[in-house]
Image (cartoon, rainbow, N blue to C red):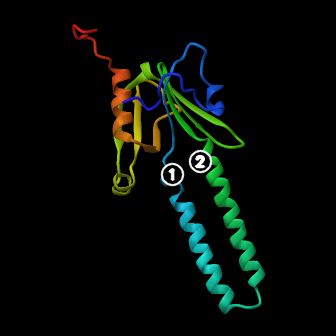
Amino acid sequence: MRLVTPGDSAPASVNKYLLPHETQVITVRRHPAVLMMPVGLVLGGLIIAGVLSNTVTNVITWIWWGWLILLAWFVWRVAEWSVDYFVITNQRMLLTTGLITRKVAMMPLAKVTDMSFKRTIAGRMLGYGEFVLESAGQDQALTNVPFLPYPEQLYLEVCEMIFPNKNPTPDD
């Protein structure tokens, strides 16, 4: 299964980090589960603000301003999530993050010596997992990639790229 079909292109925010000779194979956005904690905080804050505004009358304005700040933080987190991508090319893996301060973590596929993925109970229920990458030598910029959708399919695709079939079938 290919998660990006030939002819598709990476988002413009990611495409500028690809080399001219690289072929994009997989491009995925992090799983929306990364937003579970911000959603919980905003909803919890709304409930608390509603309860407090019915019980405490002299600081109602400050309570709601506090909740609006929390809501603005949530909108910021959603905007950050919308520009974060995990990209696998024919030569390397990239994780681009950040809205204002852009961070691009990269690991060449040739340097990957071991790769696994973890799925918590929440990850199995919601459909996300975490890649754990290891390489020979120095510490790498890309070691853990949490909240990836389709972790089994991604894992198989990346393993096929790292360890290609060296014994082609007669049909090839």
Residue carrying label 2:
81
- Give residue 152's position: percent from left, percent from top: 33, 39
Neighbour tally class for label 2: few under 14, some 14-19, many 20 plus, Cα within 10 Å: some
Q: Which residue is rendered at x = 25% and y = 10% of the image?
A: 168
* Three-letter amino acid code of the residue under disc 2: Trp
Q: CA distance from mark 2 to mark 1?
A: 8 Å
Q: Which residue is rendered at x = 66% and y = 92% of the image?
A: 55
Quick check: marks 2 and 1 in contact, CB under 8 Å? Answer: yes
Tell me if 71 is positioned left or right of 116 in this view: right
Q: Which residue is rendered at x = 75% and y = 73% of the image?
A: 65
Q: Residue furthest left?
A: 170
**Could you tell me which secondary element the residue under label 2 belongs to?**
helix
* Three-letter amino acid code of the residue under disc 1: Pro
- Give residue 94's position: percent from left, percent from top: 53, 30
- Give residue 32's position: percent from left, percent from top: 51, 51
* The one of 151 and 134 positioned closer to us in this rendering: 151
Quadrant showing the N terminus: top left
**Could you tell me which secondary element the residue under label 1 belongs to?**
helix
Which label belongs to residue 83?
Answer: none
Residue carrying label 1:
32
Identify whether 50 is placed above or below 4.
Answer: below
Neighbour tally class for label 1: few under 14, some 14-19, many 20 plus, Cα within 10 Å: some
* The one of 150 and 66 positioned closer to us in this rendering: 150
